[in-house]
Image (cartoon, rainbow, N blue to C red):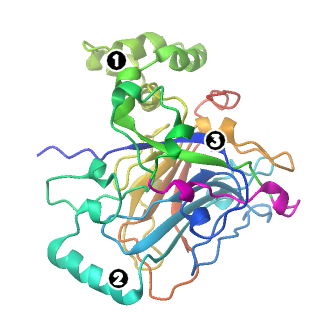
Amino acid sequence: MAAVLKPVLLGLRDAPVHGSPTGPDAWTASKLGGIPDALPTVAAPRPVCQRCGQPLALIVQVYCPLEGSPFHRLLHVFACACPGCSTGGARSWKVFRSQCLQVPEREAQDAQVKTQENSLAAEDWCEGADDWGSDTEEAPSPQLTLDFGNDASSAKDVDWTARLQDLRLQDAVLGAAHPTALSPGLPLFLPYYICVADEDEYIDFVNLDHAHSLLRDYQQREGIAMDQLLSRSLSNDGDEKYEKTVIKSGDQTFYKFMKRIAACQEQILRYSWSGEPLFLTCPTSEVTELPACSQCGGRRIFEFQLMPALVSMLKSANLGLSVEFGTILVYTCEKSCWPPNHQIPMEEFCIIQEDPDELLFKSTSFY
C-alpha cells in the first residue's frame, strides 16, 4: 500500500511587524526575526552560542498547535549571527518548543478523555482545519492557525496583507516587539509576519526563470545542462530515467530540491508535521540516527524546515548581523510531550545543510 503524502504548508514573508503587542497578540504570531515571545506560563528561551558565547538571534517563531491537543504550542529557531558561527553546525543553532494549556486543566483532562474515546474532529480546534483533514483513521495532523484559501487560480496574485484582515486570528498575527525597545547589544533581525499557503496552490504557476538562473551557476561548476533537465522533468512527458542516468547521485538531491521549489522560490519555510523533508544535499547518518526526546525518550519526527530564500530576507536591525545556510531541518518530539506545570522550553533537534557549492544562495535575492 502506497504511503499517504503529508500536506505541505509554505511560509512566506509578509508585511513588517510594527508596535509592541503583548499577550496572545504576541505569542500566537508566526514571524521571522524580532525577539522570542513567551507563552503565559513558560519563560522565553534566551540561548547563547556554544562556540563564541554570544546571545543567539531569533530566526523564526512558529505558532503550531496540534489538532486534538489542549496545548498552545510555540517553536523558536535561533542561530548565531556572529561572523562564521552560523556555519558551525548544531553548536550555533538551537530549537526550542514551548507549550501551555489552552483551557483550564479540568477541561483539558475532559478533552483528552473525549479524544481517546471518539477522536476530536478537526474543526473542533481551528478554522480551516479541514484543509488537513482525512477520512482515514490516521492520527490528526497539526494545524498552523493562520488560515488560507484553496483557490489555486489566485494563489500567486493574492495580496497577503489584505488577506490577513480576514483571518480568524487577525490580531494574533502582530507578534514582535519593536526593535527600539530592545537592548542595543541584543542581536536582532527586523521582524516580519509569516503568512501561510498550501503548496498545492502553486502547482499551476511554475515559473522556471529564477530556477534556471540558479541552476546555470551550478552548471558552470558541474558541467551539467541542469536547466534543460529541469524543464524536461516538469513537462508531462518528462523522462525520469534520463534524469537519473545523467545526473550524478550527489547532484540529484540538489536537482530535486530546485525542481520542487521552482513554483514558489520565495518560500522561507516548509511545514509538514511527520512528513518528509526536502533535502538540499544527500542526507547523512544524522537523519537515520536522530536523538530521542530528552524528556520522554520517544522518537523525533520531521516538522518543518527553513529555506534558502530566508537568508536574504533576514535584515539586521543592529550590529551588522548575518546568517548563512542552505536549509535547516527541524525535528521535534513525536508525542509533543509536556510534563504538568513545566515552565522551561524544551530543546529540540535540527540538522543544518549548507549551500552545496557555497555561493549559489549566498547573494541571491528571492523577494
The residue labelled by disc 1 is 233
Q: In this view, does 9 lie to the left or right of 61?
A: left
Q: Determine the residue positioned at 27% across, 19% down.
A: 241
Q: Which mark is residue 15?
A: 3
Quarter assignment of residue 69: bottom left
Please, which residue is most extreme toward the front here? Answer: 166
Q: Is residue 355 left or right of residue 245?
A: right
**Residue type (three-letter) at the residue carrying disc 2:** Ala
> Which residue in the rendered view is the most extreme toward the left?
1
Secondary structure under the numbered disc 1 in the rendered image: helix
Q: Residue at x 65, y 71 (%)?
A: 45
Point out which mark residue 262 bears: none
First in sequence: mark 1 vs mark 3: 3
> What is the distance, in whole Å, between disc 1 and disc 3 at their CAs?
34 Å
Secondary structure under the numbered disc 3 in the rendered image? strand
Q: Is residue 95 visible?
A: no
Of the numbered discs 2 and 3, the one sitting upstream in the chain is 3
Q: Is residue 295 above or below residue 140?
A: below
Q: Which residue is nearer to you in this view: 259 or 255? A: 259
Instruction: Looking at the image, tell me whether mark 2 or mark 1 is earlier in sequence order.
Output: 2
Residue 47: x %, y % from top left: 69, 68
Label 2 secondary element: helix
Give the magenta-colored segment's residue range. 168-186
How far is the residue under mark 2 from the one under mark 1? 49 Å
Q: Nearer the viewer, residue 359 or 57?
A: 57
Q: Horizontal placement of 85 versus 332: left or right? A: right
Q: Mark 2 points at which residue?
A: 108
Magenta span contains residue 185? yes
Position of residue 149 measured from the top left corner of the image (x, y, whole percent): 37, 40
